[in-house]
């Protein structure tokens, strides 16, 4: 009898967890929609259903230098450019790794696997919100709440892996 009761309790707990998870997902998506609709520069943001750029149309990727947030070495932008921090003093090998990393992000945006906004990030069809907590920028991603750029975010793990691959331009669609 105790086994039956425990099994019923576990089943109930599992259902409650599933319900809680579904509610949290709905809340996150509603919060995303609210943020997305309130963006003043809506036409400058990436449209996750109709990507704002296609790398193949460019035939090359423009690499610029500009000041970036503290701790940010480079970023792939929705307009198809890679921006490297003006304070980054990189040798040729480091520069190559940084560009490969950012090219992977651009490839993910081009294929629709990823999209990035100021307040959110989309990965594999799921929306994750960006937050600033105690002055630290974090993303509530599939690996939990982690700082932006953390290697445990799956989009970063894939980009880090791409850094050391012997990629060809064709691998990125250019």
Image (cartoon, rainbow, N blue to C red):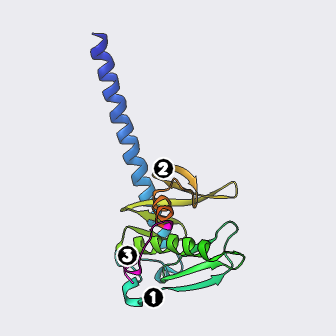
Q: Nearer the viewer, residue 14 or 141?
A: 141
Q: In the picture, which quadrant includes the N terminus?
A: top left
Instruction: Give the residue pinned by disc 3.
Output: 171
Q: Mark 1 or mark 2: name the one nearer the start of the chain.
A: 1
Instruction: Give the residue pinned by disc 2.
Output: 143
Whole-percent x, y for residue 154 in the image: 45, 57
Neighbours of disc 3 within 10 Å: few (<14), some (14-19), many (20+)? few
Element assignment for label 3: helix
- Quarter-of-image position of residue 86: bottom right
Whole-percent x, y for residue 110 in the image: 38, 76
Q: Is residue 127 left or right of residue 130?
A: left
Whole-percent x, y for residue 30 in the image: 43, 60
Which residue lies at the image location 60% right of the left edge and 85% below the top edge?
64
Does 63 sit above or below residue 160?
A: below
Element assignment for label 2: loop
Q: Nearer the viewer, residue 8 or 140?
A: 140
Query: Real-space Cα distance between discs 1 and 2?
Result: 33 Å
């Amino acid at each position: 009898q105790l086994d039956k009761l425990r099994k019923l309790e576990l089943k109930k707990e599992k259902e409650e967890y599933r319900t809680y998870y579904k509610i949290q997902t709905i809340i996150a998506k509603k919060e995303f929609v609210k943020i997305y609709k309130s963006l003043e520069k809506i036409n400058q943001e990436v449209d996750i259903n109709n990507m704002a750029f296609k790398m193949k149309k460019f035939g090359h990727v423009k690499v610029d230098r500009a000041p970036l947030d503290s701790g940010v070495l480079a970023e792939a932008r929705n307009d198809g450019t890679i921006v490297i921090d003006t304070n980054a003093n990189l040798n040729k090998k480091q520069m190559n790794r940084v560009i490969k990393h950012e090219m992977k992000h651009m490839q993910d945006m081009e294929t629709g696997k990823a999209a990035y906004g100021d307040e959110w990030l989309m990965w594999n069809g799921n929306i994750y919100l960006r937050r600033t907590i105690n002055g630290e920028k974090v993303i509530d991603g599939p690996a939990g709440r982690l700082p932006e750029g953390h290697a445990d975010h799956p989009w970063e793990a894939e980009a880090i892996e791409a850094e050391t691959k012997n990629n060809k331009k064709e691998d990125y669609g250019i």
